[in-house]
Each structure stands twice: as C-alpha cells, then as structure tokens.
Amino acid sequence: MKYLFFGACALAFLGGLVTGKSAFGHTWHEPEEEIACIAQNIYWEARNQPAKGMIGVALVTRNRVMDVRFPHSYCEVIEQGPTRKSWKDPNMEYPIRHLCQFSWYCDGKSDDISDYDRDVYQFALSIAFKIYFGELRDFTDGATHYHATYVSPDWKESKTRTIHIGDHIFYRWEMP
C-alpha cells in the first residue's frame, strides 16, 4: 500500500514537471526565479538593515512558504495580496496598491535596482541562495511577520513577538 502512495506522489511530481503545475494546482517555479524573488524581497524590505536583519526578512519568507496558511512558493508568498482586473485587458490582474503582504511589491514605484546598489543586491542574492537551499538557521524563532519600528500594525497584538533586529520587530503567528 505504501508503495502505491509513493508511486502516485512520484507520478504527480513528474506530471508537474511536464505541465508546469503541481498536483495541487500551484504553478511550478524554477529555483532561479524563486531565488530572484527572495533577493528582491530582501533588497526592497531590508537593504538598509544589518546583515542579520536582511537574513531575518528572508527567514520570514521561508517560514511563510513552510506554513500551510500561506502560498507554497517564495514568489507567491512575496506577491501575495488582493488584485484587480486591468481596465485595458480584463484578462490581466494587478496588485491593489498598498495592500500587498510586502509593501514594496505594490507601492507603484519602479522595482529596478540602481547601479550604485548592485553590491547590496548581490549580497541579497547570496542570502537568497542560502535561504532557498536551507543553509541558514532560523534565529527568528519561526517568525512569519515583521514590521518596521516606526509603524504599529493592528495585527501585532495577535502575534507572538520573537526578536528585534535593526529597524524591524519580528513575530510568529501561532497555529490554532
């Protein structure tokens, strides 16, 4: 019986490689794409933070990917938020400004990395690589949320505070 289960899982996995979708209907993302998403998130959310703060932001993203309450991939976690249909093309959807999980993703500003910041982005890329391949220990104690010290979101009261690094305070969303 267990061989039948593993055979079905293997078949579903192979089907996902062929179709680009997992057996559960999620889009398959290439490792390079996932690493790039993580690096952009680190860069835009924490480029002015100490290295530990940059890693902390990446760990939150990884913790969300591992949590069943969030999407299954790094790109989907980072791009999570409500969308609206384009007025030009009803088949296109765009994130609603200022309502994304990670504010930079839908703030309406350019996401191009400036030439003068290429070294910071390269550092974010090296962190992203290590996060994607599970090479960094989670010192955030399972944090799934964070916010800058200069804001006070209403959700913070329902989360468990875990660590303060640089300008960010990290929280864990407990399972019910």
Image (tube, rainbow, N blue to C red):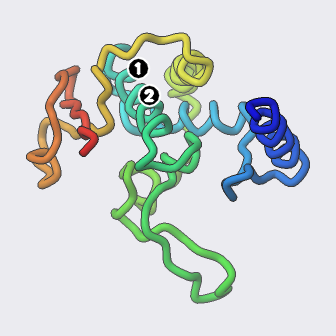
Residue 59 relative to residue 141: left or right: right
Image location (x, y in percent) of residue 32: 72, 32
Helix, strand or loop at label 1? It is helix
The kind of residue tagged 2 is Ala
Relative depth, front residue between 169 and 106: 169
Q: Are marks 1 and 2 in contact (CB under 8 Å)?
A: yes
The image quarter containing residue 88 is: bottom right
Crowd tier of the residue under label 1, counting other residues whose Cα lies within 10 Å: few below 14, some 14–19, many 20 or above: many
Label total for image: 2
Image location (x, y in percent) of residue 17: 85, 43
Q: Is residue 22 above or below residue 52?
A: below
- Residue lying furthest front: 1
Which residue is label 2 attached to?
58
The kind of residue tagged 1 is Ile
Relative depth, front residue between 12 and 160: 12
Name the quarter where the N terminus is drawn: top right
Image location (x, y in percent) of residue 54: 39, 23
Q: Residue at x 58, y 42 (%)?
A: 73
Crowd tier of the residue under label 2, counting other residues whose Cα lies within 10 Å: few below 14, some 14–19, many 20 or above: many
Residue 55 — which label?
Answer: 1
- Residue 114: tell me if it is visible: yes
Q: For marks 1 and 2, give the CA distance.
A: 5 Å
Q: Residue at x 67, y 54 (%)?
A: 24
Helix, strand or loop at label 2? It is helix
Q: Is residue 155 above or below residue 169?
A: below
- Residue lying furthest right: 18
